[in-house]
Image (cartoon, rainbow, N blue to C red):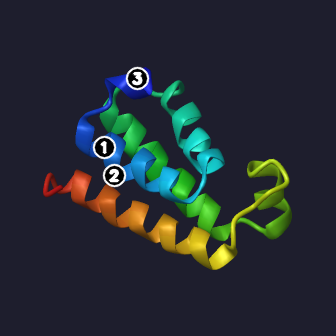
Amino acid sequence: MDTDDLSTETYSGILGEAEKLSHDLTLQYGILSYECSNEQEYIDNAEKLTKRLIKAKSYDLDEIFFGNPPNKEDLNNTLSMILKNIEKLKNNSY
């Protein structure tokens, strides 16, 4: 699937939030959509990606962000917001 196939709420809650911090972070969530067959699968995979990014070491972040990682605290704040948005999406309360 493509990110254009996502609902406005899902797009805004995940990709829109990521874009506020870094285009490279948005790219990671965008690429993820191509591995998914529907929106629910995308949301589930986005949650897994977010949790992996929270646990990522600085050398992993360096690679993910093409040598220009954001401040770890800012990244974690953004990832926490994405997780909150995912919970809202799962509970249909976005």
Q: Position of residue 7 (x, y in %)?
A: 25, 34
Q: CA distance from mark 1 to mark 3?
A: 15 Å
Residue sticking out furthest to the left: 93
Please give the residue where the numbered disc 3 appears in the rendered image: 37
Indicate which disc residue 10 carries.
Answer: 1
Name the side, left or right, on which 70 lies relative to 7. right
Q: Nearer the viewer, mark 3 or mark 2?
A: 2
- Residue drawn at x 37%, y 44% as measured from the top left: 43
- The one nearer the camera, 60 or 27, is 27
The N terminus - image quarter: top left
At which x and y percent is residue 75? 60, 68
Q: SS class of the residue under badge 1?
A: helix
Residue sitting farthest toward the bottom: 73
Badge 3 crowding class, 10 Å Cα cut-off, few under 14, some 14 to 19, many 20 or more, is few
Amino acid type, residue under disc 3 in the picture: Ser
Horizontal relation, residue 88 to residue 83: left or right: left
Please tell me which of labels 1 and 3 falls first in the chain.
Answer: 1
Find residue 21 and report its image quarter.
Answer: bottom right
Indicate the quadrant where residue 53 lies.
bottom right
Please state the horizontal and vertical placement of residue 10, each as a whole percent of the image.
Answer: 30, 43
- The residue that mark 2 highlights is 13
Type of amino acid at the residue the image marks with label 2: Gly
- Helix, strand or loop at label 3? It is loop
Label 3 vs 2, first from the N-terminus: 2
Residue at x 50%, y 74% (from the top left corner): 77
| Tag 1–tag 2 contact (CB < 8 Å) | yes
Give the class, few, some or many, for how many residues have Cα within 10 Å of label 1's Cα (few <14, many ≥20): many
Out of 76 and 50, give the one closest to the viewer: 76
- Amino acid carrying label 1: it is Thr
Residue 23: x and y in percent read: 60, 46
Q: Quadrant of the C terminus?
A: bottom left
* Residue at 60% over, 54% down: 22
